[in-house]
Image (tube, rainbow, N blue to C red):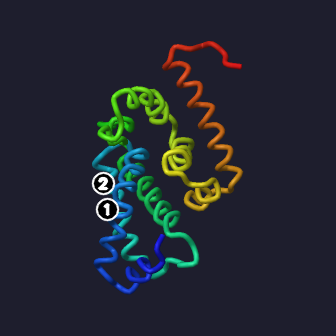
Amino acid sequence: MNEDLICKVKSGDRKAFEELYNLYADQGLRTALAITKNKSNAADAVQETFIRVYNNIKSFDETKPFKPWFYKILINECNRLLSKNSRTVLISNFFESGLDRSKYDNYKFQEYENLYKAVENLKDINRIPIVLKYLKGFTEEEISQILDLNINTVKSRLFKGRQKLRKFLEILEGGNEKHG
């Protein structure tokens, strides 16, 4: 992240904040959609996240990377919305709306469709770390900071999430065969 941009945002530069928004809004929306599984909630979470970033940027520690701080706020906001709207009907699923289909040919999309279905079926406790690590590229250390968890807890949740994904994919693909 460009430290100059953060400094400008901290000093109240609206164009710099707009640039920051443009850098993070799309990926933030995809992450929020992967967590909430609902376009409206995802958009609300991103909007609230940027409001919180704007209101709290002065307290941001510039010696630390911005991206994990941003995603921590985003995930907290997603969790707040999910608990607030616990009766939310899941109207869109992750693999349909979480991907920009124009970037993938039909073959690639079908190749990953089962994986996205499997990710969608994980409980939040495993889905959120999986999304952060494998879809967003965060390290386990960054994930532990974002989620306020011990690194070993993150590793355990990732391990269990991968196991559950593997089992679910075997079921989806009709394979009860063991792979050596």
Q: Position of residue 124 (x, y in %)?
A: 51, 43
Q: Position of residue 69 (x, y in %)?
A: 50, 67
Element carrying mark 2: helix
Residue at x 56% of width, y 14% of height: 175
Q: Position of residue 3 (x, y in %)?
A: 48, 78
Residue behind mark 1: 47
Residue behind mark 2: 43
Element carrying mark 1: helix
Q: Amino acid at mark 2?
A: Ala
Left or right of residue 69, residue 159 in this image? right
Left or right of residue 75, residue 164 in this image? right
Residue at x 54% of width, y 45% of height: 134
Q: Can the viewer see residue 32 in this picture? A: yes
Q: Amino acid at mark 1?
A: Gln
Give the quadrant of residue 37: top left
Q: Quadrant of the C terminus?
A: top right
- Residues at marks 1 and 2 touching, judged by CB atoms closer than 8 Å: yes
Q: Marks 1 and 2, Cα distance to the nearest angstrom?
A: 6 Å
75 or 65, which is in the foreground?
A: 65
